[in-house]
Image (cartoon, helix red, strand yellow):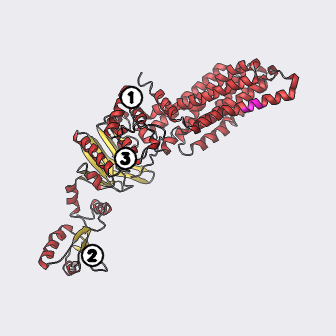
Amino acid sequence: MNQLLLPLDVMVFELRRSLTIGRIAIWMMLIAFPLGIVTTISMAAKLKLGERYTAEHLTEPFGMAMYFLIPEVSCLLGLLLWATPAISTEIEGQTWVYLMMRQSGRGVVLIGKYLTGVVWTLSASLIAVALCCIVVGPDIGSELWWVLTKLVTLSCFVHAALYLSIGTIFYRRTMVAAVLYTVFVEYVVSFIPALVNKFTINYRLRGLLADWMKWDNARSQAEHIFGSESASMHLMMLALMVAILLGIAVYRVQRTEYPTQQEG
Amino acid sequence: MIELSHVTKMYGNVVGVNDLDVSLESAAYGLIGPNGSGKTTLINLLIGHFRPTIGTVRVFGKTPTSHRGILRKIGLCPASDVLYPNVSALEWVKYLVRLHGMSHRESLVSAETALEIVGMTDAMHRPMGTYSLGMRQRTKIAQAIAHEPDLLILDEPYNGLDPVGRAEMTAVLKSWVAKGRGLLFASHVLQEIEAVTSAFLLIHGGRLLASGSASDIESILVDTPQQVVIVGPDAARLVHRLADVPWVDSLSMSAGRTELKVSLRDPAEFYRQVPKWIHSDGLSIEQLRASGGNLETVFESLLKHHRGEVT
C-alpha cells in the first residue's frame, strides 16, 4: 500500500511546487480561452437570430465548438505544458539525477508526473466545460455538460500519456516534437479518410462525441470524421492507447541514459 | 563494496572512462582528477545511470543497472545545484527519502535528522530559493545521507562553502568515515580530500592512473620525470653541477638568475644529490618546488608512468 501511494505523493509534491503565479495564470487562461469564445459565439448568435434564437437548434454548432475548444485545444495546451516536459525539465534543471538515484525514482516519478498533468489540466477543463454550458443555457447545456465532461476526462488521460511518451523519447526539443506530432497526426491525419486515422486520439474522441450526442446524421454523412464504430470500441482503443503509451514512457525512462549535465 | 572489471564507457566515439579495473573494500576513498577526467561518468556507472560499454560494474555484489534496490544503500550528492526555488529543504529531502519507499513518518524523521546533521534545522522550512549556495550544498548533503546509506558518493561537495562551512562539512564527513561507512569523495582539489581520507583513486582522461595512499602515489612519482624549480640567490651556481649529470634533461635559468627550472629524468637521484651540493658548496637556496606545483603536473607525470614511458 505504501508503495502504491508513491505516485500520489509525487503528484502532491509536484502540484505543491507548481503553485506559482505563472502556472496559476496559465491554468486560468485554459478556462478563460474557451469560455470567451463560446460566450462570443452565443452573443453573436443571439444578436443575429434575435427572436428566432433557440438553443435546441444550435446543439450541434455549440457541441462541436465546445468539443473543439476544450477536449481538443484546452486539454492539449495544458498537457503540452505539463506532461510533455515532465522529464526534460528535470534534465535541464539538473534535478533528474536526484530522482533517478532513488529506488522507486524513475517509474514512480513518471507516473506521478502523469497524474499531475492529468489533474492540473482536467481541473481547468472541467471548470471550462461547466462555465461554457452555463453560457449556452440549460436547454442544451446539461446534455453537453455530461458528454463533454466524459470527453474531457478521456482526452486528458490519453493525451497526457501521449505527451509523456513523446517527452521521454525526445528529451531535447520536446515541445517542438510534441507540437509537430499534434499538428500533423492529431489535426491532419485524424481527418484523412483511411485506416491511419483510426490510430489517432481525436478520431476516437470525435466518434464518442457523435455517438453520445446521438448525431446519427452527422455520422452517416461524415463517417471518416466521426467513425462508425461503437462507443465501446472507441473506449477500448483509447484504453489500449493509454496502456501502450505509458508502457513506452516507463520503458524509456527506465532504460535511457539521460544526460546529467555534470562535468568531471 | 565496489568492483569494476575492465569497465569502459563510450559516448559515441568519445571515451568516458577507459578500462577501469579496481576493487574497493568498504572504506573512504578520494576520487581525484581534473575537470572532464571521468569522475562523474564513473559515479554514473556506480549508481546504475550509465551502462558500461564494456566490462562489469558491481556495487555491494550487485549490478546497479539491473538491481535498483541497491540504490537504497547508496547516497549521492551530485555536483549539480538544486533548482526547486519554492520548495523547502524539509519538503524536498522528505520527498526524496519517500521515493526510497519509506513511510511518511520515517521520511519526515529521517529528513529532519539529516538536516540537523548538516546544520540546516533553522532554515529547513524556508523555500530553497532563499538559500545561499552553501545552504543549498548542505541540503544536498542532507538528501544524500537521510536514508542512512552504506556508501556515500560526493561529487565536489565543497563547492560554494565558505571556510567555516568547509570545516563543518569536513567534520560531518570525518564522523561518517569514523562510523565505518563507505565514502567516495570526488574532487579536483587534493587538499579537500586529504582532510577526510588518505586513500586516493587518481583518474585522468578516463583512466585510473593510480590508487592507494598519498605515500603510495609519492613512491610512484619519485621515479617519474618531473620538473623542479630551484629558487634562491645562488640558484645559478648549481648549473655547473647539474649540466653534466645524466639524470637531468634540461636546464632553464630565469632572467633574474634566481630561479632555475630543471627537467629531471630521475627525480630520486636529484633529491639525493642536490642537498649534498647545497651543503658542500655553501649555497643559499630558499625553495625547491615542483614546477607548476599543481595537480595537473602530478597527473601528467602519472600519465607518463601509466603509458609506460617510464620504467
Foreground residue among A107 and B83: B83
Rendered image quadrant of residue A158? top right
Spatial CA span between label 1 and label 2: 62 Å
Q: Amino acid at mark 3?
A: Ile
What amino acid does circle 1 point to? Gly
Q: Chain of mark 2?
A: B
Instruction: Indicate left or right for B236 with B138 as reference.
Output: left
Q: Disc 2 designates what residue?
A: B259
Please report the bounds of the magenta region as a residue range: A36-40
Residue at 37% x, 28% y: name it: B102
Q: Chain of mark 1?
A: B
Q: Is residue B70 above or below residue B153?
A: above
Label 1, label 3: how far apart the Cα atoms are: 32 Å
Residue A33, percent from left and from top: 69, 34
Residue A68, label in figure = none
Q: Is residue B272 above or below residue A157?
A: below
Q: Which residue is mark 3?
A: B54
Give the image location of residue B10, x and y in percent: 41, 50
- Of helix, strand and loop, which mostly describes the magenta segment? helix
Where residue B25 sits: x, y (%)? Answer: 23, 42
Front residue of A121 and B163 = B163
